[in-house]
Structures are given as C-alpha cells and as structure tokens.
Amino acid sequence: MNPIHLIIIGDELLAGKRQDKHLQKIASTLASRGAELTSCESIRDVPGAVTEAIKNRLANDTLIITTGGLGPTVDDLTREGISDATGTGLRFDEDLWSKLKARYERRGRKISDSSRSQALVPERGTFFPNDFGTAPGLVFECEQYPGSLVVALPGPPRELNPMWDDQALAFLAERYNWPAPPRRILLRFVMAPEAGIDEKMRPILKGHPDVGLSSLIRIGRVDVTLSLPSDYPNNTAILREIADRTQDEFQDFVFSRSEFTGEEPDRLVDLEEMVMDILRLRKETLATAESCTGGLISKWLTDYPGSSDVFWGGVIAYDNSIKQNLLKVSTGTLDTDGAVSESTARQMVEGLLDLTQTTWGIGVTGIAGPGGGSEEKPVGLVYVAVGNRERIEVKRYEFPGDREFVRELSASVGLWMLWRRLIQTEPKE
C-alpha cells in the first residue's frame, strides 16, 4: 500500500485554541477502504512552512493530504505553498469564479476581489467544488514525482467532511485502486470492561484469524467492530456467527448491534436512545432524580428529538432540602444514613414515582469529588437506584477517577440498570 501522510495546518491548533477534528475522520475512512494513514504532522500557517513540509515528504509519500489554510485571507497560504512544493502552477478558473459570485448574489451579497484566490486551481490536477463554503478542494499532480498527489482540503469540518465523503475519497479510491469497503458488524457494550471483553472474545475468535477486531472506548461504554474484506468468502455469515456468540456471552452488556459496509453504520444507536425506544414501544414513561450527576441523565435523554414521548422530567436534588421536600426522603434517613446511602437512593426513587406518576424512575446520589469524601464514604462512592412501583433495585459503586469520570459513569450505570430491567420484564397491560 502506498504511503499516505496527513498535514494539519493552522496556527490556532498549535496554540491550543482549537482541537483538531480531522485526524480521526480521515484515518478511519482510509482504513475502511483498505488504505492506511502512515504518518501525520501539524504545522503553522506561516510563509514557507507548507512548502517545506511537503518537500520533506514527497520523496517518500505517494499521497499527501492537507487540511486548512485555503481561505481568502492573507494568512491562508496552503494553496501557494503546495504549488511551490510540487512545481504545479495555479490558474484562475472563470467558471468557478462565476459560480462563487452567483452564490453570493443569491444571498444578497457581493463577493470581494480578495476572494478571487478561491478560484485558483492547479494547472495539473483537478479540484472538488465546495457546497458548504468558498474554498474548493485542490488536487496537485507533482512534476518531480509522477504518480504522487497532494490533496488540499478546507479546514472547517462542515466543509471538509462532506467534500471528503462525497468527492475526495471516491476519487482517491479509483486513482489508487483501493479495495471495496469491508463488511463490518458493530457491537455496543455498556458497563463491560475492555479487558473482560477481550478475554471472553478470544475463544470466540479462535479459528477466524482473518477477522479484524477494533474497539473504541468511552466512559462506561465500548464499541467493538468486527470486519472482513468485502471479497472474503461467506464474510457476512462468519461475522454474524461471531456476533451471535458474543451477544450470548454478554447478554447484559450488548445493547446495540449494527451490520454495515464501510466506515460506520448509517445510524448509531446509543444507550439512552435505546432505552427511550423500548419505553416508547411499551407505552411507559420515565423520570429522574439526580444529585451528583446534576441532571446529566436528563441532558442525555433530551438530546434526542421525541424524548418528550417518554421522559417526564427530572429533579436535580443537589441539596438535602430538595430530597426532603420534593422527593420525601425522610429526615431520619438523612440523619442516620446520610445523603449518600442505599436508603436515600431508594427513597429518592420512591418519592420521584409518587411525584411524577411515571412508570420508571432513576435515582443517583454520590460523591463526585474532588472534595467531600471521608474514610467511610470516599470520593467516587455512588448509589444508583432504578425501579417501578413493584421493585426498586439499588447498587453501590466506588468509581476511581476525576469528577467528570464519576458523573458520566454514574449516569451510564443508571441507564444500563434501567435497560436491563426493561429487557427482563414484560410491559404492563
């Protein structure tokens, strides 16, 4: 496979003012086409930097991809820098310029003469129109290294992503004869440690050395992707067999499964969305009572359109007075067991169900840190309660990590516990 190098251009990236969003996108899509990003660097958008970076790589890399620095301002130097490095001149494309002017006129604006640089394209090569901005993507043929290309993409993700997905990737796949995207199955786990997943999947994968396995870890959640080349005999059947056995082994932890070809499924279902889909099918409702998570579960649920079908609302019971007055946690419980206790978590859900008249309730109370802990109740101690009027289940956890980690993991546990109850119980008539 031909070497591929990525150059991420932008002063603001190296100054820490903005986070790069392109490396993962480009690397993952290249991998989905059987290509491999072999190296990456980030450079400043200053005179000479782009030219030097590309010249240093051209002798070794067949394909160089750059992001950023294609705008109309004086500090956007990528276009000229690549031209100098490759020996490929720039020409003014009248048709492209006319389309840019027409786009501005439709918006009741007049394009400035300084934007004429947006119509400069390589004399040898091609370009990709930009439907979401003014800077086209540019493809430079290299005079000194025939067969090598430099592909320049705009920096803003809303411009780069559709251009890469809809134009550049297909162009490069045809140019370099990349294989068709592999067949994949994605399994989404919740509250299953990565080491445990790996240990239990090894026997399942035995006898299938060609099956690719990759994992993406988030707090409380792991995505595992199984893959086989598109032309591999019986690829779908083999992947399904492995996925079936994995789901049987992890019945309480795999909440979503997607089969697809390429980089990722058309639609990724997350745990909170899965919970709401099940509640909607059962015609049931949910409310939350959150202390240390501060409304995080409610936030995750309401990120999805249509959440009001099943989600009644939430009580952020941060202070004990809210636990007492709204959720009816008894003074005796708070005095004897404390706000962070099994009994308090249970009474939070009991009071929540009485207050909201919902089918299900989730209650979370804990010590997220960094302060507030003690020897008896350390930072990271969390009680999560989930239940309905028939039964409330409470679990105790001690989570290591910072405040954000404890809060996110606690919220994930609440949704996981509810999901498990939903798939294990029949809906009420």
Image: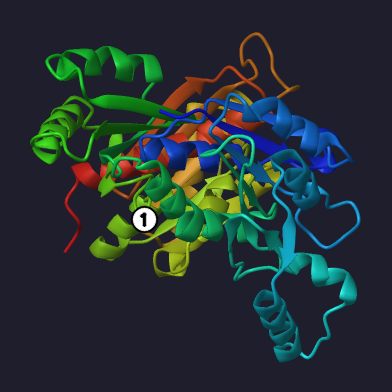
174 and 185: which is toward the camera = 174
Q: Is mark 1 on a helix, strand or loop?
A: loop
Residue 270 in view of the camera: no
Q: How many marks?
A: 1
User: Is 275 displayed left or right of 157 in the figure?
Assistant: left
Query: Residue beneath label 1, please?
Result: 267
User: Is 351 displayed left or right of 151 in the figure?
Assistant: left
Residue 100 in view of the camera: yes
Q: Residue 104 at x, y = what percent? A: 75, 83
Using a 10 Å C-alpha cutoff, classify the residue at mark 1 as few (fewer than 14 neighbours), some (14 to 19) or many (20 or more): few
376 and 130: which is toward the camera = 130
> Where on the picture, by quarter, is residue 309?
bottom left
Rendered position, 119 above or below 167: below
270 and 306: which is toward the camera = 270
User: Is 171 displayed left or right of 266 in the figure?
Assistant: right
Q: Residue 334 at x, y = what percent? A: 61, 32
> Where on the picture, by quarter, is residue 145?
top right
Figure quadrant of the C terminus: bottom left
Which residue occupies 40% across, 47% down? 173
Q: Residue 149 at x, y = what percent? A: 57, 42
